[in-house]
């Protein structure tokens, strides 16, 4: 059975974004300055997270959507 991977996006008080990828048991977060985030990148991250098979792959897909390598 496949674990469901979810993405939560929070905008901090200073304008930076925190992307949290989680499953039932654990989570990983990525903080990104606001100048690296666009509406298109956020939408791509939301769309791509459904194809992640674990947390590391989920973070990788978020980075790829935002153009962070």
Image (cartoon, rainbow, N blue to C red):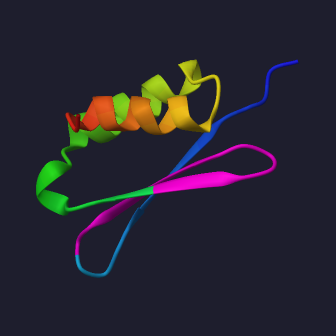
**Position of residue 47 measured from the top left corner of the image (x, y, whole percent):** 44, 26
Say which residue appears at 11% left-offset and 57% top-offset. Answer: 35
The correct choice, above or below, for 3 with respect to 12 in the image is above
Q: Nearer the viewer, residue 21 or 60?
A: 60
Splitting the image into 4 quarters, where does residue 69 fall? top left
Q: Is residue 67 left or right of residue 50?
A: left
The correct choice, above or below, for 56 with respect to 21 in the image is above
Q: Is residue 5 left or right of residue 46?
A: right
**Position of residue 41 measured from the top left corner of the image (x, y, whole percent):** 26, 36
Q: Which residues are magenta?
A: 15-29
Q: Quadrant of the N terminus?
A: top right
**Position of residue 25 measured from the top left corner of the image (x, y, whole percent):** 80, 50
Say which residue appears at 56% left-offset and 53% top-offset. Answer: 28
Say which residue appears at 57% left-offset and 24% top-offset. Answer: 52
Say which residue appears at 34% left-offset and 29% top-offset. Answer: 44
Helix, strand or loop for the magenta stretch, by majority:
strand
Q: Is residue 45 left or right of residue 4?
A: left
In the rendered image, residue 21 lying in the magenta stretch gets the answer yes
In the rendered image, residue 25 lying in the magenta stretch gets the answer yes
Residue found at the very far left of the displayed protein: 35
Splitting the image into 4 quarters, where does residue 53 fall? top right
Q: Is residue 7 left or right of residue 19?
A: right
Residue found at the very far bottom of the displayed protein: 13
How many marks can you see?
Answer: 0
């Amino acid at each position: 059975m496949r674990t469901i991977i979810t993405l939560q996006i929070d905008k901090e008080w200073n304008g930076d974004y925190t992307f949290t990828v989680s499953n039932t048991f654990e989570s990983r977060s990525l903080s990104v300055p606001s100048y690296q985030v666009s509406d298109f990148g956020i939408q791509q991250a939301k769309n791509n997270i459904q194809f992640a098979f674990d947390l590391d792959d989920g973070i990788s897909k978020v980075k790829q959507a935002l153009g962070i390598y």
